Image: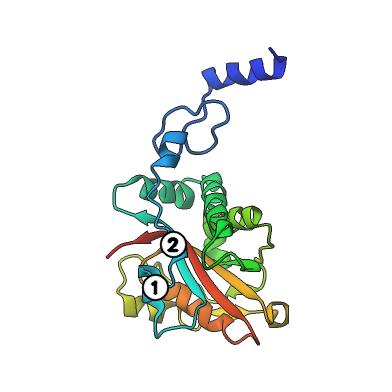
Amino acid sequence: MNPTTWLTDLLGLVFPNLCSACGQPLVRNEEVICVSCNHRLPRTDFHFFEDNPVSRIFWGRVNLQAATSFLYFNKGGKVQHLIHQLKYKGNKEVGIYLGRLLGSDLKSGGLLKEVEVVIPVPLHPKKQHQRGYNQSQQIAIGIAGAMNIPYSFQNLIRNTFTESQTRKSRYSRWQNVSGKFTVLYPHKLEGMHVLLIDDVLTTGATLEACAQELAGVSGIKISVATLAYAQG
């Protein structure tokens, strides 16, 4: 046996890496999420359909090429646990890993396979400093890597620190974020098809505010994707 492989296996027995979804030890060649949990992820496949529950949220609000979410989000489910790991437990690898899965799905077919650059919903610098990172950037890294396209973190910025959107109504959420974003270098996005990324879609207020700001760029096309879709 290769000494390196033997040492890796020994360390895995003593200090096992755990599945971020179920907490069971990962075996060799598994990363972040075990094969069993991976196969059970509640995929939506919305990216194959122009008319889907996500795209309907934005009808009449902002002009999009396509809109999708990767997974269904249910309270108490594994997707909620994964999002919690990503946002509040410092587990950035969850975002990158799930982003890669989403990017692979988008690249394989459907309405979003021709996007040219990935842009995450930005956090205000104060919020990003508090958390240590922007969870949507981690998702964007995974998507961009899987689709072999660039990501942009320095163009769309949040210029005002806003309150948490949790427990706000749809209208209150929109008021909280409307006009709070700025495109710094619009010429770099002219004529491009951008993919706007966020973690969980609820009312769509934040994505709408970002898309409205991006819509001022000449010739731009905008699509939206989130890691999860909170039904109802």
Callout 1 amino acid: Asp
Location of mark 2 (residue): 69
Q: Of the residues tagged 2 and 1, which is closer to the observer?
A: 1
Q: Position of residue 126 (x, y in %)?
A: 55, 65
Q: Position of residue 29 (x, y in %)?
A: 58, 30
Callout 2 amino acid: Ser
Can residue 129 be seen in the rendering of this structure?
Answer: no
Query: Mark 2 packing: few (<14 Cα in 10 Å), some, or many (20+)?
Result: many
Give the vertical position of 232 relative to 173 (above or below): above
Give the vertical position of 151 relative to 51 (above or below): above
The reply to whether the C-beta atoms of the residues labelled 2 and 1 are less than 8 Å apart is no
Secondary structure beneath label 2: strand
Secondary structure beneath label 1: loop
Give the vertical position of 107 relative to 180 (above or below): above
Q: What separation in Å lies between label 2 and label 1 (alpha carbons)?
A: 13 Å
Closer to the chain start, of discs 2 and 1, is 1
Give the vertical position of 137 relative to 20 (above or below): below
Q: Position of residue 99 (x, y in %)?
A: 54, 53
Residue occupying the far top of the picture:
1
Picture quarter containing residue 61? bottom left
The quarter of the rendered structure image containing the N terminus is: top right
Q: Position of residue 206 (x, y in %)?
A: 45, 73
Picture residue at 41% right of the left edge, 75% below the top:
205
Picture residue at 39% right of the left edge, 81% below the top:
59
Disc sitting over residue 51 in the figure: 1
Task: Count how many numbered circles sit on residues in the image.
Answer: 2
Q: Going by the image, does 24 lie left or right of 182?
A: left
Picture residue at 55% right of the left edge, 36% below the top:
31
